[in-house]
Image: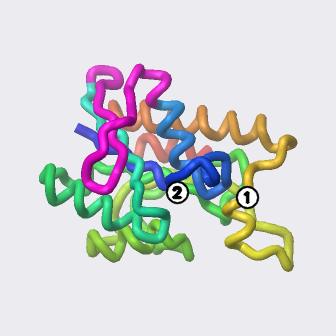
Amino acid sequence: MKWIVGLGNPGSEYAKTRHNVGFMALDRLADRHGISISQSKSKSLIGEGHIGGVKVVLIKPMTYMNLSGEAVRAYMDYYKVALEDMIVVYDDMDTETGKIRLRYKGSAGGHNGIKSIIQHTGTQEFDRIRMGVSRPDPGHAIVDYVLSPFPKKEKELLDQMIEATCDAIEFSLKHTFEQTMAKFNG
């Protein structure tokens, strides 16, 4: 079984913001495979199903971004799942909008959701898909930037990035994460 954690903030006011691309990717993946992310468990909304014969659990923490690790820990402890079966999907300002980068370990890089997961799991070693949102222009507050929606001119890039993220997750279910990185880190 694989468990995929998409990071974001709950609430309609955050739905289309840069910080919520992790939620957007999980929603698209769920749509592709007829999975409903609607069960409230472990401080998250959860959807269970199968993708290509592999059991998956799609998890959207409802703790707000900065406390994402609480939901990850709650799920791990309750279901006794292995950290090596987790993939975290989230926004990354150091990656250009429209691009994705896969990593299997590393620091939080200033991302509070990842910082929280590292704090609550005690390790930096977990698979992740970073979805590019680029950096704001100089003088633009980071918090305002990540909590703002994508402009219309980036809609196509956003859509392509969400599709690529879903493709990478699907590929990773039948291949090692190293093979998935080799294919999708182009």
Q: Residue furthest bottom?
A: 139
Q: Residue furthest front?
A: 12
Relative vertical location of residue 173 with respect to residue 3 in this rendering, above or below: above
Magenta part of the chain: 30-53
Q: SS of the residue at dot 2?
A: loop
Residue shown at 35% from the left, 66% from the top: 69
Residue shown at 41% from the left, 20% from the top: 34
Colouring method of the image: rainbow
Q: Nearer the viewer, residue 95 or 10?
A: 10
Q: SS of the residue at dot 1?
A: loop
Image quarter for residue 33? top left
Identify the mark nearer the N-term, 1 or 2. 2
What residue does disc 1 label? Answer: 148
Q: On the rendered image, what quadrant is the C terminus found in?
A: top right
Q: Nearer the viewer, residue 174 or 97?
A: 97
Q: In the shown orientation, is residue 169 left or right of residue 101?
A: left
In the rendered structure, does residue 44 fall within the stretch colored magenta?
A: yes
> Percent from the top left, x then y, of residue 14?
62, 53
Q: On the rendered image, what quadrant is the N terminus found in?
A: top left
Residues packed near mark 1 inside 10 Å, few (<14), some (14 to 19) or many (20 plus): some
Image quarter for residue 157? top right
Q: Could you say which disc has been placed on residue 39 in the image?
A: none
Residues packed near mark 2 inside 10 Å, few (<14), some (14 to 19) or many (20 plus): many
**How many numbered dots are placed on residues in this image?**
2
Residue shown at 41% from the left, 69% from the top: 67
3D distance between C-alphas at marks 1 and 2 = 12 Å
Q: Nearer the viewer, residue 106 or 8?
A: 8
Q: In the shown orientation, is residue 134 left or right of residue 89?
A: right
> Percent from the top left, x then y, of residue 46?
33, 41
Residue shown at 77% from the left, 35% from the top: 156
Which amino acid, by three-letter code, is at mark 1?
A: Ser
What residue does disc 2 label? Answer: 9
